[in-house]
Image (tube, rainbow, N blue to C red):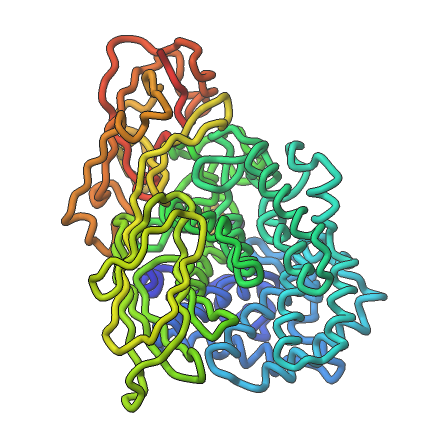
Amino acid sequence: MLKRQKTGATGHMDTLYPLVMGERNGWLGGDGDQWERGPYWIDGLLPLAYILDDKELKNKVQPWVEWALKSQQPNGFFGPAKDYPGEEGIQRDNSADWWPRMVVLKILQQYYSATGDKRVVDFLTKYFKYQLETLPNQPLGKWTFWAEYRECDNLQAVYWLYNITGDTFLLDLGNLLHKQGHDFTHMFLETNHMACQGSIHCVNLAQGLKEPIIYYQQSGDKKYKEALTKGFADIKKFNGQAQGMYGGDEPLHGNNPTQGVELCAIVEMMYSLEKMIEITGDLSMVDHIEKIAFNALPTQVTDDFMHKQYFQQANQVMLTRHRRNFYEDDSHAGTDLLYGTLTGYPCCFSNMHQGWPKFTQNLWYATPDGGLAALIFSPSEVTAKVANNIDVCITENTYYPMDNKIRFTIDILDKKVRSVNFPFHIRIPGWTKGASITINGVSYKTADGGKIEIINRDWKKGDYVELEMPMEVKVEEGWHENSVSIERGPLVYALKIGEDWQKKEVSDAEKNRYGESYWEVRPTTKWNYGLHRLDFKKANELIRTNIDNEKIKSDYPWNLSNAPIELKVNAKIIPTWGLYNEMAGPIPHSWSGAGEGEPEEITLIPYGCTTLRISQFPLVY
Ligand SMILES: [Zn+2]
């Protein structure tokens, strides 16, 4: 996936989107776009460049880093500070806004982590002193409300620097930022905003929901943890969709499976979960990020990582240029669901790059007991210091999430060290029961899900640990109109629908707004099925699983033809469930008896492999 990003849009935004990402960008000193989009791209390109250790990509990043560092004024302020008159397709005002600077803080943190460039520490110290002095008179909301809702991105950078320098003024700044930011703790605990459509912008929610946990590090008050627990529960209850996200197109828009899920909300929610997992180690959050990464994320960008959807739907049966039922219908001329570059709104095309590289950064965690934790699973290799500064390398081999087996192989990098004693923490996902762990082929333990297994021993070079996690088919209940979704392990399954892709050119008059071209996708097979007499308790027996042992090894399973797993389940057509505004019409309430004819066997495949899908099904007799 990371290599696809390099050859796809992430590696080429400067030529694909020169109006914004070219040398006129304000973050390169130009008179063009002065706001968030340039920094958004670099926030994804920088970790991609360093994870791939790719010189060409690093060379694209460096001018942005250098310009930001050199733009710092004696008082600590940095970045563009001059507004320009409006010009179609670029954002030239609010140049002094606190918000886009928060994205640059995230860039510089990652740059420091990758390079150790000490200029970053001095730079941030100066800027945070400037913030502490200036915010009382020029508060977060002075230019736009985005900075107030996204204050925790600023706050997490302040605490990150505090953990490096220990400067106590940073804690004063922490309190000030928390006070000026939107009060997510109050919103989750004391208001009904999660039950109110339009109460908050979907990306502000994805970013801001971590604020209580970020600030908890300083305050220690358990109400901040309680706020997040209630917030997550209410988001799911009132707005939840089967792929782990929520209806928000852009304002929060309830739990109908045809409401939009914005790509920015997906990558920002993943970043929020990553930051919170660092602090809490909460395993339900690890399960949650895998659900989003392995279901919602792969399908919203094309296989070549060149085109994206601004919105996706849990029940998505037709991607055409048409009005639907989104808050944004009037603003983007019916382009919200298309696979394009600037279709919908250009924020997602600029911001989508951070999803996979940051996910990769967060597969492994250091633990306070001098060990290592494998929390999020993917094929990877980590080099780290354990115990008393001994360098080890652990290689994770797996076809997860398609397969249920993982093998970790340990290497000690210092040839003189024969063995090293350190605790190896392995997450057992919440969805499994009876996971087995073997060490060097010998059975070690059976473990239930939702906890960490800590293996303490003298590790030698070549030792290996194998984890096998039984995946049972389960029914997730309680979605909109009592619809259900089907899960197996970390994957959500959706109806396999034939796809007809057609490329359309954008007229010259619209190219600045919607890009050169876009893809429409129409269904070639029926989609209006209800699941027939599904006994939830027997789902694992009633729903048959077919696994293709060759396809499972694909390094890119995320499309219709590569899907390695099929589930077979009985269903009936619901004739009254049809198209409405070129999307799946109102979903019939479960058990309303609307199914007709004989039951037939339908095929479900992993959600992330689908482009068109039903993932929330009504139930029929
Ligand atoms: Zn967006």
Residue at left offset 41%, top offset 63%: 454
Q: Position of residue 70 (x, y in %)?
A: 61, 83
Which of 466/604 is in front? 466
Residue shown at 22%/66% (left/top)?
440
- Asked whether the viewer can see residue 307, the reply is yes
Residue 229 sits in which quadrant? top right
Looking at this view, name the residue that lies furthest to the bottom. 416
Q: Is residue 104 above or below residue 315?
A: below
Give the side of residue 507 with respect to residue 132, left or right: left
Residue 356 seen in render: no
**Residue 277: x, y in percent?**
53, 58
In the image, residue 240 sits, relative to residue 368, either above or below, namely above
Say above or below: 185 vs 271.
above
x%, y% of residue 581? 46, 24
Q: Could you tell me how many numbered marks the image carries? A: 0
Q: Residue at x 65, y 37 (%)?
A: 194
Q: Which picture quadrant has residue 536?
A: top left
Closer-to-camera residue (319/293)? 293
Q: Quadrant of residue 299?
A: top left
Q: Could you say which is closer to the camera, residue 449 or residue 305? A: 449
Q: Residue furthest right?
A: 137
Apparent side of residue 492 relative to residue 270 in the rendered image (left or right): left
Which residue is farthest left?
550
Along the line of sight, the residue nearer the viewer: 67 or 280:
280
Q: Residue at x 81, y 64 (%)?
A: 138
Q: Considering the image in quadrants, where does the N terminus appear?
A: bottom left
